[in-house]
Every structure is written in structure tokens, then in C-alpha cells.
Image (cartoon, rainbow, N blue to C red):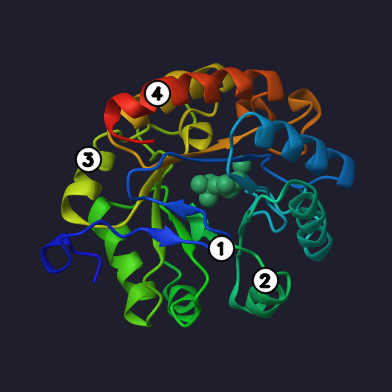
């Protein structure tokens, strides 16, 4: 179902509010790694919205390496995302970690459900998400091949939910300078063999705030339909992923550059 052979036209994921992902538009999804407080999420939401982001990201359920690290505000985080959504009108993208959270996410009206890298091959979860209508942002696993990413998309699509957005977020390699290695070639490859929109996450790929801009620019040049970027009002104090988070001012600058170059690569 994800194969371009049987579906030559690009899939455009349409949201009820008129926004879309794919189909020649450049989508900017921005916000903090984790929702931390009402003041934090509303401030970041207003700033990224003003800079041109169309979607707000923010984790309420966080897949942390250590069980002792901040695990997210959970249900309260979803409520705070909705406060920010009301204030800015931005649809919400947030990660779901378990089938047990599906009802909560539907009640909260989450606009795009993120499946994180660590859950790319949670087939039971993918199958359940296949029964929803909510668009799914499916991130590539830490060691997931392109073929495996597409097969995971198939698990969702086989159930009837064809609103899948693929996300390249860097893969594990022997390189340690960066958190992961951005597989830039995955972008044109996924666009060639699949019709699904492709979004790149330069924040988790590089793991370093100053790398976000060049990786984002490379993603646009490679044909990405969108970017998902972490932005925090005070990165030094962030409860997760501060080192890779942009300040709102830095995001202003990156968004400006993306808007300058995106038309050169066929994205409005
Ligand atoms: C995130 O988006 O904050 C996240 C945990 O991403 P990934 O699943 O790509 O590591
Ligand atoms: Mn993060």
C-alpha cells in the first residue's frame, strides 16, 4: 500500500482545519521535546507559530533511556498541548507509546500521532493505529532499514489508515560526534519508492543545536516534505534534549532560511 508502483500520485495527508502534509507544501512542525508547563508550551507555541510553523510538537509521554529520567507530564501534558492549540490554532503532533494510550489520545483530539523510533517495530501498536483515522507520523527506528520502515508503514496502512507520514530522524552508526547519523539518502529513496510524505527530524539526527540548520537545509534540498524541529524557551533548563533544542530566536532564523530555499526545490 505504501509502494509507488501501485499508487503513482503523492499522498497528501489532509487535516480537518485545511492544513496538509505533502503535495508540494513545506511543513514545519516545531516545539519542545517535552511539554513541561503551561507557560513553557504556550510561549514556545506562540513563537514558533509566529515564525511560520504550522504544527506544534511536544512530548507528553516520553520514551527515555533511563527509567529515572523525566518521563513526561502524561495526560496533563496532553491538556497543556490543547491549551497551546487553543491559543495559536496549531494542530498537535505528540508521541503515543502504548496501545493503552489510544483512547486518551482520541479524547484529547491529538491531530497527528507520533510513533517514536523505539516503537517503529511494535507491530501490535502499529496494527491498532491502523484502525484509526488520525494521521500517523512514523519515525524510523534507531537501527531500522528503509525497507523495515516501509514495512512498518504497511502495518498501519493494512488496517485502513493510509494517512502515514514517514520520518527520517537519523540512524545509529559508528560515528559518535553526532547523536545519530542523518541518512539524507533515505529522503529521495523513500520519495522514489513510496508515495507517502517524508519529514526529516534534524534535531534528533544531529543531537546538537548548531547542526539543526545545515541538516534542515540539506533535507529540503533532498526533497523532504517537512521538518520536525525541537524548540525550547530555555534549552539549558530543558527536562529533555536541551542540547539539540533551538531557542525561539534561533528557530526564527532557521524557519526564515527554509522559507527562502524551499521554493527552489518545489515546495511552497
Ligand atoms: C522525540 O521526538 O522527542 C523523540 C523521542 O524522537 P525519536 O523517537 O526519533 O527518538
Ligand atoms: Mn526529543
Residue 160 image position (x, y, % from top left): 37, 81
Compute the Cα span from label 4 to label 3: 14 Å
Picture residue at 60% right of the left edge, 28% below the top: 244
Which element is circle 4 on? helix
Picture residue at 31% right of the left edge, 60% below the top: 11
The residue labelled by disc 3 is 188
Q: Is residue 213 visible?
A: yes
Residue 124 image position (x, y, % from top left): 46, 79
Q: Nearer the viewer, residue 54 or 183?
A: 54
Compute the Cα span from label 2 to label 3: 32 Å
Asked if the residues shown at circle 1 and circle 2 are in contact, with their CB atoms under 8 angstroms apart, the answer is: yes
Picture residue at 40% right of the left edge, 63% below the top: 164
Which element is circle 2 on? helix
Q: Nearer the viewer, residue 10 or 224?
A: 10
The residue labelled by disc 4 is 217
| Residue 67, quarter of picture | bottom right
Compute the Cα span from label 1 to label 2: 8 Å
Residue 246: mark in rendering: none
Residue 54 image position (x, y, % from top left): 58, 43
Question: Does label 4 or label 3 sit earlier along the sequence?
Answer: 3
Question: Does label 4 or label 1 sit earlier along the sequence?
Answer: 1
Compute the Cα span from label 3 to label 1: 24 Å
Amino acid at each position: 500500500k505504501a509502494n509507488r508502483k501501485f499508487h503513482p500520485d503523492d499522498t497528501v495527508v489532509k487535516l480537518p482545519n485545511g492544513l496538509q502534509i505533502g503535495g508540494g507544501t513545506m511543513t514545519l512542525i516545531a516545539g519542545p521535546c517535552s511539554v513541561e508547563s503551561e507557560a513553557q508550551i504556550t510561549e514556545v507555541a506562540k513563537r514558533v507559530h509566529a515564525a511560520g510553523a504550522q504544527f506544534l510538537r511536544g512530548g507528553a509521554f516520553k520514551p527515555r533511556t533511563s527509567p529515572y529520567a523525566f518521563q513526561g507530564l502524561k495526560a496533563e501534558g496532553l491538556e497543556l498541548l490543547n491549551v497551546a492549540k487553543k491559543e495559536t490554532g496549531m494542530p498537535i503532533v505528540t508521541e503515543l507509546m502504548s496501545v493503552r494510550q489510544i483512547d486518551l489520545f482520541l479524547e484529547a483530539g491529538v491531530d497527528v500521532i507520533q510513533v517514536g523510533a523505539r516503537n517503529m517495530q511494535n507491530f501490535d501498536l502499529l496494527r491498532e493505529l491502523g484502525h484509526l483515522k488520525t494521521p500517523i507520523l512514523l519515525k524510523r527506528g534507531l537501527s531500522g532499514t528503509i525497507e523495515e520502515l516501509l514495512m512498518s508503514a504497511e502495518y498501519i496502512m493494512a488496517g485502513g489508515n493510509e494517512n502515514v507520514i514517514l520520518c527520517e530522524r537519523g540512524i545509529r552508526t559508528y560515528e559518535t560526534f553526532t547523536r545519530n547519523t542523518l541518512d539524507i539518502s533515505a529522503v529521495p529513496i523513500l520519495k522514489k519508492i513510496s508515495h507517502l510524505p517524508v519529514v526529516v527530524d534534524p534535531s534528533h539526527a544531529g543531537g546538537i543545536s548548531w547542526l539543526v540548520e545545515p541538516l534542515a537545509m540539506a533535507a529540503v534540498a533532498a526533497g523532504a516534505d517537512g521538518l520536525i524541529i525541537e524548540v525550547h524557551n530555555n534549552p539549558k533548563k530543558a527536562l529533555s534534549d536541551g542540547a539539540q533544542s533551538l531557542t525561539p530566536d534561533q528557530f526564527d532564523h532557521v524557519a526564515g532560511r527554509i522559507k527562502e530555499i524551499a521554493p527552489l526545490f518545489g515546495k511552497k
